[in-house]
Amino acid sequence: MLTLCILVPLLGALALAAIPSIRESTARTIAIAVTAVPLLLLLVVWAGFAPGAGFQSVAEARWIPSLGIAWRVGVDGMSLSLSLLTGVVFLAAVAWPMADLPRARAYYAWFAFLYAVSLGLFVTLDLILFYVFFDLSLVGMYFLIGRWGHGEAQAAALKFFVYTLAGSLLILIGIIALALSMPEITFDMRAIIAAAPLAAAGLPAALVLLGLFVGFGIKTPLFPVHTWLPPAHVNAPGPVSAILAGVLLKMGTYGLVRLALQMMPQTFVDWALPLGVVAVISILWGAIVALGQDDLKRRIAYTSVNHMGYAVLGIAVAGSAMGTQAARDIALTGAVVEMIAHGLITGALFLIAGAIWQRHQDYDMAAYGGLAGVAPRLTGATTLAAFASLGLPGLAGFVAELHIFLGAFAVYPWLAAIGLLGILITAALFLQLLGRVFFGALPAARTGFADLTRIELGILAGLLGLVVLIGVWPIWLLEMIGTAPVAVAGG
């Protein structure tokens, strides 16, 4: 089932790229179909999933047995929830209508390819395949930004690729070190997690963990290795930004949990506090810099640095030896919920920014104002997404941040107190955004501003409906996440 989730969009990408007889007008329909099928398959996997029972739906086939490399797939609560998030956000991005889209067949082919490798990264249980999928995701995003972006798109795509490729090389070194430290060489994630082979390795283990921190920190992104993110977002099309924020950034935090925390728990303990400090700096830096942006999309981009800082704070707390096991478990659960919430909320915000760009090709907030009078549906969707992002109770962001800060106050109370300031600044930046773009006087040049179409509204309603559902009834997500990542982290 999980193998099919990867193969279906991959075959769809090959068909879109290789069959010239496919009409440009039907490329989007094909892409929607090959995106929807894996999501349906994942729902079937979820229906048979037993929370807290470890990796499930496992399939394995020998590939390079001399090196302990195999096709291994399977999911626990964390990877299943992130795979479902990937399916939802990709379906929304592919279905999002794009006016006057050049080379539509190639555009949707790259989307399907990126979808396949993104799902592959979250469901693989082999570290070499994890690295392969990680690097292939860079290729897909590079072309989507560079070929269909605007402004300085090619420069932004190059910066994205170089930064994240450098990080991936550090990750590869860590992967090799973990495999070689096993009694018998293997890249099986389950075996390495169970063995924690670098537990007593001293300085070498610390260097491996540092490499994983930097590599995944670039992808997350954390301060100060976040500078590739704003230009990538600003110059990318709205749906591409939605994928970058909603899915690709989660590869960084997922890797921090799966490799750094679960495979090196004893070494992680020694470095949990420094990681927590970096996370809080990212929280405050992202919020403060976002508040100073006049560019709508750049402001949203910096909030990703802020929100992913919350997730990393939860991971740092989970890997600490301080506090109680229950507090650390709560923090890690919050970190996973934050990944899901951020993916849905910020994915919706970038689609909204893309809708504004398609109508007037301008992200300058000073060029707008008063849009509530001519675009009430756009105003309502943006307001709901903004309040969700600032952590309003009853919405997904609040559930995530409540778990993270409850755990953090029990382990690192002073870090948690400082991190709370980020929520205050985030509230200010989103309220200011709403005031400048949607309220006040409507500029004469915006009198013909078109509201959301039915398709656009339906897509945003799907994403934001999940945001509300998690906020008012989170038990289904919390049960799915279960204790699979938490139990190992407690070791």
Image (spheres, rainbow, N blue to C red):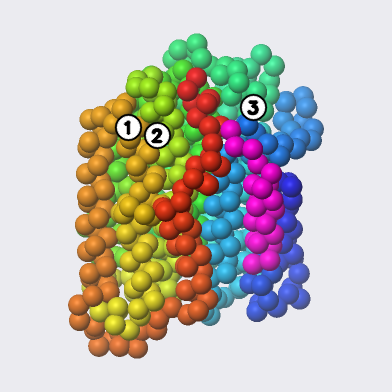
Q: Are marks 2 and 1 in contact (CB under 8 Å)?
A: yes
Q: CA distance from mark 2 to mark 3?
A: 23 Å
Label 2 packing within 10 angstroms: few (<14), some (14-19), many (20+): many
Q: Earlier in the sequence, mark 1 or mark 3?
A: 3
Where is residue 454? Give x, y as percent.
50, 79
Near mark 1 (Cα within 10 A), the count class, few <14, some 14-19 or many ≥20, is many
Q: Identity of the amino acid at label 3?
A: Arg
> How far, Cα to Cα, is label 1 from label 3?
28 Å
Tell me the element at label 3. Answer: helix
* 244 w.r.t. 255: above or below: below
Which residue appears at 44% of the width and 15% of the height? Answer: 203
Q: Which mark is residue 408?
A: 1
Q: Quadrant of residue 275?
A: top left
Instruction: Looking at the picture, tell me which residue is in the foreground, 397 or 16.
Output: 397
- Residue 24 or 373: which is nearer the viewer? 373
- Give the quadrant of residue 150: bottom left
In the image: residue 285, left or right of residue 99: left
Q: What is the x, y in percent for residue 254?
A: 51, 39
Q: Position of residue 23 (x, y in %)?
A: 70, 78
Residue at mark 2: 331
Number of the front mark, 2 or 3: 2
Residue 234: in sight, yes or no?
no
Q: Which residues are magenta?
A: 32-52
Does residue 51 show up magenta in the picture?
yes
Task: Give me the disc on residue 109.
Answer: none
